[in-house]
Image (tube, rainbow, N blue to C red):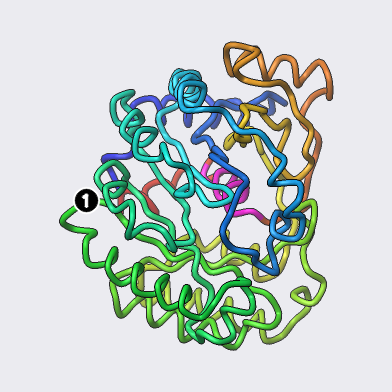
């Protein structure tokens, strides 16, 4: 992971660190951008807000290839780490062209989050990424098909694709992570999935499912089984297993403890170029990056429209917000999680 710690990332990191250390209520420099390439998806996951409002995602317009490249150029001026998500990014016919452009522009960290149902058709994508994040929540094919709203045959295909890509990590020089979203109904299935990941040299990540607006499911809070599950993940990390996330992150999602969020460390952009301010769960749009012409101008517009960063202590528990905030507050995490 050391190769992903570029000069730009380290520069932004230390500027943010000293801004926070000296108590400035500033808009922090991005450590990475989350870019929703599309809101369209071929799954209808029960826990997904987009999945529950399919009619809205189908109406949402996304930038064409050229406009998407213009967005990448704007983003690259601010930082060289990008995280593609959706919807399902591999639905886009131009996904290979987009990933190639990221390499040409000089992005050091290129991550794509996918449900793994289409990767066998677009295996070339592995040539241009540094991180592959596979959304996969449990091994039981019958139960999982119900959660995803897809046939069992498609679930089998997803599992086959995960195993295929796991074997290609060293050859294609990318790191693979399974991202497991936990809902109350799947708590007891997760340990088997975690062991499956360890067996096949896949990093394991766990996140609690959200409700609309980033709110936590009350059936996870104060849930003894859920707490025991997160404890088992923490133990696996202590035992040297490939678990994603710092101990601070894992303890935060175990206890749902409040944390002072710095959301502009990881700006979120929708497929048409809309930039959320201060964060995606609140859904305030600062400006459109294409219209503004730069990230800095878009952020300034957001400040004028919505004011300075609010004090937020646990509105959501997204890993992107928790971990970036943890890293800024504690430089040792950079060494332990990325260099060590």
- Asked if the magenta segment contains residue 325, the reply would be yes
- Asked if the magenta segment contains residue 89, the reply would be no
User: Magenta: predominant secondary structure element?
Assistant: helix
Q: Is residue 117 left or right of residue 53?
A: left
- Residue 243: percent from left, percent from top: 42, 67
Does the rendering let one see residue 117? yes
- Residue at 72% x, 61% y is 210
Relative to the observer, which residue lies in front, 253 or 58? 58
- Residue 110: percent from left, percent from top: 38, 40
Quarter of the image where the C terminus is located: bottom left
The correct choice, above or below, for 16 with respect to 301 in the image is: below
The correct choice, above or below, for 105 with respect to 44 in the image is: above
Q: Quadrant of residue 287?
A: top right
- Residue 151: percent from left, percent from top: 54, 77
> Residues in magenta?
318-327
- Residue at 79% x, 51% y is 213
């Amino acid at each position: 992971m050391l190769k992903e710690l570029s000069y730009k990332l380290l520069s932004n990191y230390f500027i943010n660190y000293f801004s926070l250390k000296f108590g400035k209520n500033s808009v922090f420099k991005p450590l990475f951008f989350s870019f929703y390439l599309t809101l369209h998806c071929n799954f209808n996951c029960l826990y997904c807000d987009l999945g529950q409002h399919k009619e809205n995602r189908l109406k949402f317009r996304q930038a064409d290839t050229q406009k998407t490249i213009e967005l990448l150029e704007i983003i690259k001026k601010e930082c060289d780490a990008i995280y593609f998500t959706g919807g399902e990014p591999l639905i886009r016919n131009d996904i290979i062209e987009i990933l190639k452009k990221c390499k040409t522009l000089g992005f050091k960290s290129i991550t794509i989050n996918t449900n793994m149902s289409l990767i066998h058709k677009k295996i070339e994508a592995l040539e241009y990424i540094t991180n592959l994040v596979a959304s996969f929540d449990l091994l039981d094919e019958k139960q999982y098909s119900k959660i995803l709203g897809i046939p069992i045959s498609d679930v089998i295909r997803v599992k086959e694709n995960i195993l295929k890509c796991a074997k290609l990590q060293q050859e294609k020089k990318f790191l693979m992570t399974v991202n497991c979203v936990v809902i109350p109904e799947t708590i007891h299935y997760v340990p088997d999935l975690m062991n499956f990941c360890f067996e096949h040299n896949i990093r394991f990540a766990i996140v609690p499912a959200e409700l609309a607006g980033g709110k936590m499911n009350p059936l996870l809070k104060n849930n003894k089984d859920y707490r025991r599950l997160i404890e088992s993940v923490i133990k696996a990390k202590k035992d040297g297993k490939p678990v994603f996330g710092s101990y601070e992150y894992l303890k935060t999602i175990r206890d749902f403890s409040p944390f002072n969020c710095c959301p502009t460390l990881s700006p979120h952009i929708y497929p048409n170029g809309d930039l959320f301010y201060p964060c995606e769960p609140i859904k305030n749009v600062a400006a459109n990056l294409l219209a503004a012409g730069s990230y800095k101008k878009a952020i300034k517009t957001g400040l004028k429209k919505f004011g300075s960063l609010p004090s937020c202590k646990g509105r959501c528990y997204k890993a992107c917000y928790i971990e970036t905030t943890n890293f800024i507050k504690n430089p040792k995490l950079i060494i332990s999680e990325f260099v060590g």
